[in-house]
Image (cartoon, rainbow, N blue to C red):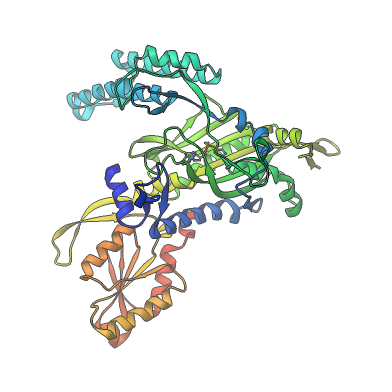
């Protein structure tokens, strides 16, 4: 399914709505509908279980969104959390300079490489080896070298905070505004991505507050509170799920880049000098977490950063192949002792740990930190993109028919079981079905549906990814047996009502993901 169909599906089936839609929406802001909130909660549960519940040395936290403004000075966000932006004077549209340059590489150079590859594939047929062709064809090598050179220079200018040279690259590459087609640009300047607001009782700069741009800082400032109250020993982690806010210059691609979004972050506090070991450990552990959901490994890859954030000495992205290409889904950052050190300096409070295992008599030190940070909304989008499929299956009469099915892992499905009376105007059937619904709803998120023919009801449940449909028919009234239909195999088994709970429980158990 293409991206447009995916977005339409999310709306039609109550997963995601444009925020304030009746006022024509607010750009890059979305609301999660009844099925969306369930899926999102299940993703969070899977993350929390694997990070907190299943690690004796990782504990949870839920810090406030507002923090003392000095937090953001110490963390470097006031001075360095910027994107290079420029405006097109004709269209009045604002862009990120680095994204314009990256798009240029993709659309003007990479697309030509792809065309050559496709032509060669047709020419050579079965015997075609793409990797070999890419590494030996001179025209492709020249074009790739051009991309590498452009991106290298761009990264260098970004690292050096050299906005003038970045602007010069836009001119040199003759990049035009995608909207107006004009090259009438302003100069490139840094734009801070933090949203600010004002405390009610303090006027001016003093009362200026920021909406947190990452949840991590709530963890850093609570490092000692948590360590002391839980008596954790290094290495240990603190995990948190919560909203973050960024005034993105170009927010687009549906819920991929929003101004209000949710993060699932974990800071792992370690001995200085051990960061490489833990960086490798968490890189692998987090990739396995994604694979355990059944995601095709070919759709996941690492992208190591050349351009490191101000706090990191190593960083990688786990990228997922979204319908619009490979993009960052999760970040793994070796944050050194940067944050704790800076908070220590600015607050005047010690943020140190006494490690009895360091040196001969033990040592006090500021721990190093390894961070894993994943966007909940991006994970949601990745799951939807993975799961949404169209397939041909036999209908009730055995003929081929097309169904749209959301093949989410059963444990993540918004509704676990649908209870369907065969007919809606037979009171004995609906009464029995409601009894079954009431019982199952003590354990699972269930749906009761009596409208339309049974086949259409199955299709509705397929479209939201419901693993099981339980049908109550006339035999049920005689012998208390029901039909349980499996979303993926389409098998229907006849079982006693008392067995349904165990069947569903076994199928939707989160433990299956960890197996
Ligand atoms: N604490 C580190 C940190 O915030 P980041 O790479 O800037 O690192 C981490 O963000 C994750 O948050 C990203 O991998 C992405 O999944 C998500 N994320 C970042 N900006 C986002 C946005 N504007 N909309 C949706 N998700 C976003």
Relative to 388, say whether 313 is above or below. above
Q: Residue at x 47, y 35 (%)?
A: 248
Residue 60 in view in this figure: yes
Of residues 89 and 52, the one nearer the viewer is 89
Q: Residue at x 31, y 50 (%)?
A: 388
Total marks placed: 0
Asked if residue 220 is positioned above or below residue 475 in the image, the reply reads: above
Is residue 274 something one can see in this rendering?
no
In which quadrant of the rendered image does the N terminus lie?
top left
Residue drawn at 31 percent across, 17 percent down: 140
Q: In which image quadrant can residue 352 be found? A: top right
Q: Quadrant of residue 208?
A: top right
Left or right placement of residue 331 versus residue 337 in this view: left
The residue shown at (38%, 38%) is 252
> Measured along the vertical axis of the image, is residue 105 above or below residue 383?
above
**Residue 179, x across and y down, in percent:** 31, 27
Q: Residue furthest bottom?
A: 478
Residue 313 % position (x, y)? 61, 28
* Residue 49 position within the rendered picture, expressed as x and y whole percent measured from the top left: 55, 55
User: Could you tell me residue 234's position as x and y percent?
Assistant: 72, 44
Answer above or below: position of 483 versus 387: below
Judged left or right of residue 56, residue 16 is left
Q: Nearer the viewer, residue 288 or 350?
A: 350
Q: Is 436 or 242 nearer to us in this picture?
A: 242
């Amino acid at each position: 399914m293409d991206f447009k169909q995916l977005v339409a599906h999310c709306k039609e089936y109550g997963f995601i709505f444009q925020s304030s839609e009746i006022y024509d929406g607010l750009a890059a802001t979305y609301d999660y509908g009844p099925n969306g909130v369930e899926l999102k909660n299940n993703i969070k549960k899977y993350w929390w279980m694997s990070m907190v519940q299943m690690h004796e040395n990782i504990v949870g936290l839920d810090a406030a969104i507002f923090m003392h403004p000095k937090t953001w000075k110490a963390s470097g966000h006031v001075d360095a959390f910027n994107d290079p932006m420029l405006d097109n004077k004709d269209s009045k549209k604002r862009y990120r300079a680095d994204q314009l340059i990256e798009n240029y590489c993709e659309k003007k150079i990479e697309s030509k490489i792809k065309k050559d590859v496709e032509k060669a594939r047709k020419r050579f047929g079965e015997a075609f080896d793409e990797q070999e062709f890419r590494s030996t064809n001179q025209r492709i090598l020249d074009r790739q070298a051009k991309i590498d050179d452009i991106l290298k220079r761009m990264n260098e200018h970004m690292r050096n905070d050299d906005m003038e040279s970045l602007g010069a690259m836009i001119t040199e590459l003759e990049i035009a505004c995608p909207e107006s087609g004009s090259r009438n640009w302003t100069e490139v300047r840094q734009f801070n991505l933090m949203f600010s607001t004002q405390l009610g009782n303090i006027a001016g700069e003093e009362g200026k507050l920021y909406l947190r741009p990452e949840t991590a800082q709530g963890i850093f400032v609570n490092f000692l509170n948590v360590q002391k109250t839980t008596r954790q020993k290094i290495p240990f982690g603190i995990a948190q799920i919560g909203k973050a806010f960024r005034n993105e210059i170009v927010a687009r691609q549906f819920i991929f880049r929003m101004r209000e979004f949710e993060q699932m972050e974990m800071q792992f506090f370690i001995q200085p000098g051990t960061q490489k070991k833990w960086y490798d450990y968490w890189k692998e552990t987090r990739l396995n977490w994604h694979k355990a959901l059944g995601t095709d490994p070919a759709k996941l890859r690492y992208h190591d950063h050349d351009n490191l954030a101000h706090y990191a000495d190593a960083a990688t992205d786990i990228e997922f192949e979204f319908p619009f290409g490979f993009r960052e889904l999760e970040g793994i950052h070796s944050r050194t002792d940067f944050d704790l050190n800076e908070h220590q300096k600015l607050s005047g409070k010690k943020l140190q740990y006494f490690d009895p295992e360091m040196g001969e008599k033990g040592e006090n030190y500021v721990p190093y930190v390894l961070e894993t940070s994943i966007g909940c909304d991006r994970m949601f989008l990745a799951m939807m993109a993975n799961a949404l499929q169209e397939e041909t299956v036999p209908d009730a009469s055995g003929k081929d028919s097309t169904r749209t099915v959301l093949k989410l892992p059963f444990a993540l499905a918004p509704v676990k079981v649908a209870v369907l009376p065969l007919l809606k105007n037979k009171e004995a059937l609906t009464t029995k079905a409601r009894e079954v619904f009431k019982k199952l709803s003590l354990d699972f998120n269930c749906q009761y549906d009596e409208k339309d023919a049974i086949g259409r009801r199955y299709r509705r449940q397929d479209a939201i990814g419901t693993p099981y449909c339980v049908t109550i028919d006339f035999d049920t009234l005689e012998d208390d047996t029901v039909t349980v239909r499996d979303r993926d195999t389409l098998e229907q088994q006849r079982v006693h009502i008392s067995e349904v709970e165990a069947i569903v429980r076994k199928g939707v158990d989160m433990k299956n993901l960890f197996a």
